[in-house]
Image: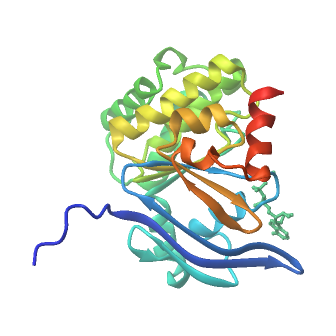
Amino acid sequence: MTPSTNTPERVIEIKDLHVAFGDNYVLRGVNLDLFKGENLVVLGRSGTGKSVLIKIIVGLLAPDSGQVRVLEQDVLSLSAVELEKLRLKVGFSFQNSALYDSMTVRENLEFPLVRNVRNLSRAEIDRAVEEALDDVGLKQTINQMPSELSGGQRKRIGIARTLMLRPEIMLYDEPTAGLDPITCIEINNLINEVQERHGASSIVITHDLTCAKQTGDRVAMLFDGQFQRVGTFDEVFSTDDERVQQFYHYNFTE
Ligand SMILES: Nc1ncnc2c1ncn2[C@@H]1O[C@H](COP(=O)(O)OP(=O)(O)OP(=O)(O)O)[C@@H](O)[C@H]1O
């Protein structure tokens, strides 16, 4: 039998995940799929467990129970070496960009390549750096130091650095936090370009509903330890549920 072409491929599958820290029950039966090529936005108030979830996906934290499959591998049973290999396919864009302040933009971008890919020629490294800078529209910053860049530029260079290893999955942790509305839109556009140009599958953690609306093919809202609402932006917010409405009004009316 030929497999159905209608079933989208899952690049992340999470089933019945439970995590508690003492009597703080953070995740209480989380189920979530990330489909190949989609942008999935994860929304939730502070402290609901979004970062905990990301750490579990990349194997930095072990849950109390549940299943986590990433790119068809069972994360919870991988050895340290296998986890390291898997992490090369999962790009993580940190909230604070995490650039090395003492390195130029070029050196920051080269770093993941030189560290993880052997036997690259100087010309190959240069080409990869130029392509990554082109992807984020910042070729002119190649010799600048991070301190000379704006917050939005730093964010974009951080994303470019994550793209150097051409990850299959991108995890964005609050990509628009602390940026002005115009720069936010630029970052949202960049997230969509990464999806289109590289076919990356992404999880975008954010509190910013404009970002959610512009980037999310689907939105998943975490509260009380579970994804209580999952769907398109409009589907998630077309409810009388007060907790969901509060989130909406906080973003759009204050
Ligand atoms: N290593 C840890 N030890 C103890 N408690 C932890 C640990 N990591 C996270 N927590 C707790 O788990 C809960 C969820 O934290 P998490 O950082 O995932 O929240 P979040 O949804 O990412 O919040 P924010 O939007 O503010 O970043 C919090 O109550 C936090 O204090």
Q: Is residue 2 left or right of residue 137?
A: left
**What x and y, as percent, mark residue 140?**
50, 14
Residue in the image at 73% along x and 77% along y: 19
Counting from the top left corner in percent of width and height, residue 219 is at 56, 49
Q: In which quarter of the image is residue 59?
A: bottom right
Which quadrant of the figure contains the C terminus? top right
- Residue 124, given in percent of the width and then of the height, sits at 31, 37
Horizontal relation, residue 90 to residue 98: left or right: left
Figure check: 80 above or below 136: below
Chosen colour scheme = rainbow
Residue that sits furthest to the front in the current view:
240
Q: Quadrant of residue 208?
A: top right
Q: Which of 153 and 176 is in front in this view?
A: 176
Residue 174 vs 50, above or below: the answer is above
Where the N terminus falls, by quadrant? Answer: bottom left
- Residue occupying image coordinates x 64% and y 63%: 227
User: For the point 51% across and 44% down, which residue is it?
Assistant: 162
Is 53 rendered above or below residue 199? below
**How many numbered marks, from 0 up?**
0
Residue nearest the viewer, comparing 214 with 138: 214
Q: Residue drawn at (41%, 32%), measured in percent from left and top?
A: 193
Query: Does the image show residue 103?
Result: no
Query: Which image quadrant shows ligand 1?
Result: bottom right
What is the residue that sits farthest to the right in this orientation? Answer: 23
User: Residue reaching furthest top?
Assistant: 140
The answer to which of 30 and 36 lies nearer the viewer is 30
Residue 73 visible, this orientation: yes
Observer-nearest residue: 175 or 232? 232
**Residue 238 placement (x, y as % from top left):** 62, 45
